Amino acid sequence: MNIILCKPISEKATAITPCLGLGYLATAIRKKHEVILLDCVKEKMDFKDFDEFLQKEKPDIVGIQYFTCDHSSVLKMAKVAKESGCTVVVGGPHPTGDPVGTLKNKDIDFAFKGEAIKGFPMLIDSIENTNSFENIPGLIWRKEGKVIINDNSFDYDFEELPAWDLIKPDKYPFAPHGTLCRAKPAPIMITFGCPFLCAYCQGKHLTGSNIRKRSIESIINEIKLLYEIYSIREIHIEDDNFTLDKNYAPEVCKAIINLGFKDLYFACPNGVRLETLDEKLLKLMEQAGFYSFAIGIESGNNRILKKMGRNTTKEVIRKQIELIKNNTKIRMTGFCMMGYPTETLEEMEETAEFTRSLPIHKVQYGNFHPLPGTPIYDELKESGEIKDLDWDKFQDNTISYSPEGVTKQQLKKQMSKSFKRFYLRPKIIVGMLSEIKTFGQFKMLIKRGLESF
């Protein structure tokens, strides 16, 4: 069969990075089927372009990555694909969190809850041969008008590499989600799964609660491929929990050091768990080429941290950040959230003051979104605090929700004030200017700054 796997059309996306999930799916099906990976953001496609692309390629199946922020775009693409006679399959965080709602749309034939790498090849075989869908892990499908949600297994080992020859990482623009990089990066995953219970996160539903670790041989083979074939000189580790295993992470770092690639850099733009870091691991990571971390601060108020299910305190956060500062030159970006349920403006200001007092180099104040499938979403639905949500407002710097007692305008104003007070300080400005390598980076930095302010 001919299959197109799509990263959806988006006019708002600023981070243009390869999609590993689609790359792994392509690897899983390409032995039997013809596969095209289509990054509509990278290709600057609109819906007319997408329609013309389908008319040219004539795929049997169109698979679309589905984040909540891409809701309307995914539905429009599904309609275009359906009108072209294709079977439409979606997967990702949104159908994982709202499986029944996803299949209410008549243009979507199938969806996946959680990982689709085992289930998607089985679905294609069933469409071709048997039309039997009961045993396909993670599949969301219809039977006699009822939506059926199959259990997922979360046991894929990820030893086979994503289809980098179809992704072509060297053809991507210099616009990663970390903004400031030392070289054009490519993303990789090292571990999968998350055992933590953060109330705002879908992680365990997407990849399971148990940590699965790739073999070091597989990781090194991927790094060598990216370095030698595609001339990649910066690797972005996209894991949630790379540093969780105190024995495994050092072994990965030692293997990277043994490669001897002196001009290869590493960053963790998706974040590292602060509690997992110690002096020995930090120094080993820096020796391996790690120069940048994102770190999960989330709040500077202990009551809110507890309500988030973060299982930490601001005192522990400060201690671990000081540990990084005192033992390495690794640059740190703090991830913070504002507008969490029950949070007051005073508590948001406490977060802003806390981040300004820390020895970090950048910060992102993201507004809270009640993502479907998360514990806090279920809590808010049950209490009646949220009813009809506009999924298209689940964008960075677009307010989809504000806690009781705080208007959306007040929340937006608080976030803007916090950004300005953090960044409009000489030491922060000088530090960021020192990281800029290209004029394109400078333009991207200004664009994202204006959106935040």
Image (cartoon, rainbow, N blue to C red):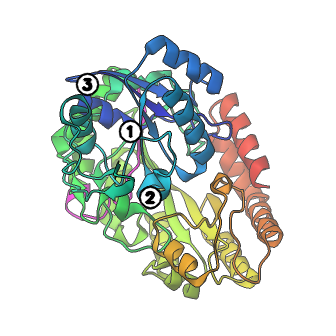
Q: Callout 2, which amino acid? A: Val
Residue 415's quadrant in the figure? bottom right
Q: Which residue is mark 1?
A: 20
- Answer with mark 3 or mark 1, whichever residue precedes in sequence: 1
| Relative to 286, 46 lies left or right | right
Residue at image x 30%, y 45%?
Answer: 116
The residue labelled by disc 2 is 100
Relative image position of residue 400 (x, y in whole percent): 69, 63
Q: Position of residue 339 (x, y in %)?
A: 67, 73
Q: Secondary structure at mark 1?
A: helix
Indicate the position of residue 62 as horizontal and vertical percent values.
42, 30
- In-image side of 45 versus 209 (left or right): right
| Alpha carbons under labels 1 and 2: distance apart | 26 Å
- Label 3 to label 1, Cα distance in Å? 15 Å
Depth check, front residue: 420 or 161: 161
Magenta-drawn segment: 232-249
The circle drawn on residue 30 is 3
